[in-house]
Amino acid sequence: MSTWSRLNRGETEIDFVGNRRRWFTISAVLLVIALGSLGIRQLNLGIEFVGGLGMQAPNPAGADVPEIREALGVVGVDEATIQLLNDGEAVRVATPVLDGATENEAVDALASVTGSDRVDISIEAVGPSFGALVARRALIALGVFLGAVVLFISWRLEFKMAGAGLVALVHDLVITLGVYSLFGFPVTPATMVAILVILGYSLYDTVVVFDKVEELVELEEKSSYSEIVNRAMNSVLARSLATSLTSLLPVGSILFVGSVILGAPTLRDFALALFVGIAAGTYSSIFVAAPILATWKEKEPEWQERAKRASGRPKAGMR
């Protein structure tokens, strides 16, 4: 019987809990890199969060980034993020908050260097106070979501499962933000929406695993908690991998279409966060949440006693 057939039947015997040091080491390395990047490079926050001027213009003159940067520098705009869209057919520029006169001069400079009419330039100006309000509300939404997660899992399953699930969600959040920081991807409201979506996806995958663990706890009275977790993981592994793969393929297609073919920044920002987050969420639900839960539960006196009894009987080996 092939490995995939055994996987689909839940007949694999992978020792997820026994190899937890390996999984935790991988996660620790990824988290250190992510946190280091967030501390050094920080996040490239869009103007929606920090305020500023956003301009998008057609580019019939075919101006490149250095030419646009030089034209803006002449009018005193030295800090600008410039992106060429659709193979240079359009250009998007983001600047810090500017006064009224400098803002008008920046728009005129962009129109001149790109050979476009001023009326064809899309302009988005966001004040710093409004940007701070958007950022604050995004953090509040994230906090409410995480709080609701803890309450729901504690009610539906148990508190330690909620704690392990919360650790997995924070793991996914930090790694996703770390990727954005490391590569300088802009963080926009679309990114925040996508992050909430991927946290929900990761939570779903984790709850599926925990629900299976809860089911086996009631059925297998002589097994240790680690054995129960391993059996639960092996039984739902094919489902988790299939769900992740069928999610990553269309999201990857959206990312390619949005960034390469259409040059749509909003579509790209949304799909990029989804792609990174789903990949991290798949890993955390399999290799982080369940092993952490087993580690915590094994410290309970009841499960310590059951582990001693289980160690004295023969059992199938795990890989």
Image: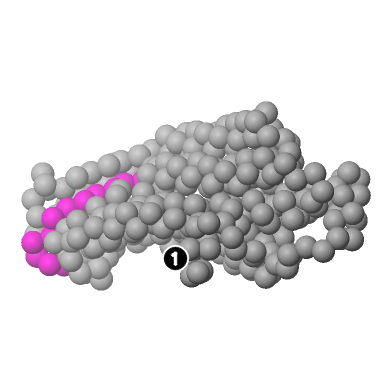
Q: Quadrant of residue 32?
A: bottom right
Tell which of 23 and 29 is nearer to you: 23
Q: Residues within 10 Å of mark 1 (few under 14, many from 20)?
A: few
Q: Is residue 125 left or right of residue 64?
A: right
Q: Residue 104: within the magenta?
A: no
**Coordinates of residue 226 in the picture (x, y in percent):** 76, 55
**Residue pictured at 25% horizontal, 71% vertical:** 66
Residue at 70%, 52% in the rendered image: 229
Between residue 47 and residue 96, name the one nearer to us. Answer: 47
Q: Which span is picked out in magenta?
A: 51-63
Residue extending farthest to the front is 1
Residue, x 17% and y 65% (percent of image)? 88
Residue 37 position by quadrant: bottom right
Q: Secondary structure at mark 1?
A: helix
Camera-side residue of 223 and 20? 223
159 is higher (above) or lower (below) than 112: above
Return the residue at label 1. Answer: 183
Residue 189, image x and y in percent? 40, 42
**Quadrant position of the C terminus in the picture:** bottom right
